[in-house]
């Protein structure tokens, strides 16, 4: 007997989808009675939560699931995959360099501000010394 991981994955995802749908139905039935009792704010919150749920569900099953299924069947050792890996590493390295430069820039601005404040205090103390003399 052969072990088919895709049918096992399909069964697991189907089970998760059924549980999510059952929870949504339960939330909808309990939410309708509460919305009628507590007014428009709860109705708006229920509508918002339903929109967020629908958007996330659509994104996960409409976009992520097909992409991950397609990626699963792409051969791992070829030039396209190697290029994607190298590009991701280069992008990560470039982002790290940008963050490092930004941190150095912030540190230089902080040091310049401190130096300006110190110079201002020196000038103020000099002015006070001249005024008292």
Image: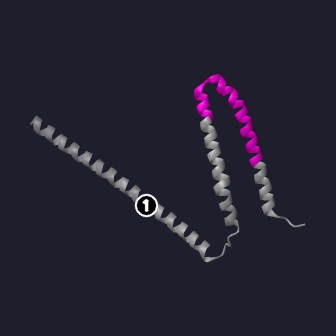
Q: Residue at left 32%, top 52%?
A: 109
38 lies above or below 91: above
Residue 89 % position (x, y): 54, 67
| Circle 1: element type | helix
126 or 23: nearer the viewer: 23
Residue 105 % position (x, y): 36, 56
Q: Residue at left 70%, top 26%?
A: 33
Determine if the magenta segment contains residue 29: yes
21 or 100: nearer the viewer: 21
Residue 88 % position (x, y): 55, 66
Which residue reaches farthest left? Answer: 133
The colour scheme applied to this rendered structure is one colour
Residue 120 % position (x, y): 22, 44
Q: Residue at left 69%, top 30%?
A: 32
Q: Main SS of the magenta segment? A: helix
Residue under numbered circle 1: 98
Q: In the image, 80: left or right of 115?
A: right
Q: Which quadrant: the N terminus?
A: bottom right
Q: Residues within 10 Å of mark 1 (few under 14, many from 20)?
A: few
Q: Residue at left 61%, top 36%?
A: 47
Q: In the image, 117: left or right of 51?
A: left
Q: In the image, 86: left or right of 30?
A: left
First to last magenta residue range: 17-46
77 lies above or below 19: below
1 lies above or below 51: below
Which residue reaches farthest right? Answer: 1
Determine if the magenta segment contains residue 26: yes
Q: In the image, 45: left or right of 119?
A: right
Place residue 133 in its image quadrant. Answer: top left
Place residue 7 in its image quadrant. Answer: bottom right
């Amino acid at each position: 007997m052969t072990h088919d991981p895709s049918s096992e994955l399909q069964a697991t995802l189907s089970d998760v989808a059924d549980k999510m749908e059952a929870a949504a139905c339960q939330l909808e039935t309990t939410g309708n009675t509460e919305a009628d009792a507590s007014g428009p704010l709860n109705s708006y919150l229920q509508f918002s939560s339903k929109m967020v749920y629908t958007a996330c569900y659509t994104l996960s099953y409409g976009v992520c699931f097909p992409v991950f299924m397609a990626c699963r069947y792409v051969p791992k050792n070829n030039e396209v995959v190697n290029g994607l890996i190298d590009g991701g590493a280069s992008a990560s390295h470039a982002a790290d360099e940008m963050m490092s430069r930004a941190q150095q820039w912030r540190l230089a601005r902080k040091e310049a501000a401190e130096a300006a404040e110190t110079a201002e205090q020196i000038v103020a103390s000099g002015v006070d010394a001249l005024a008292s003399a």
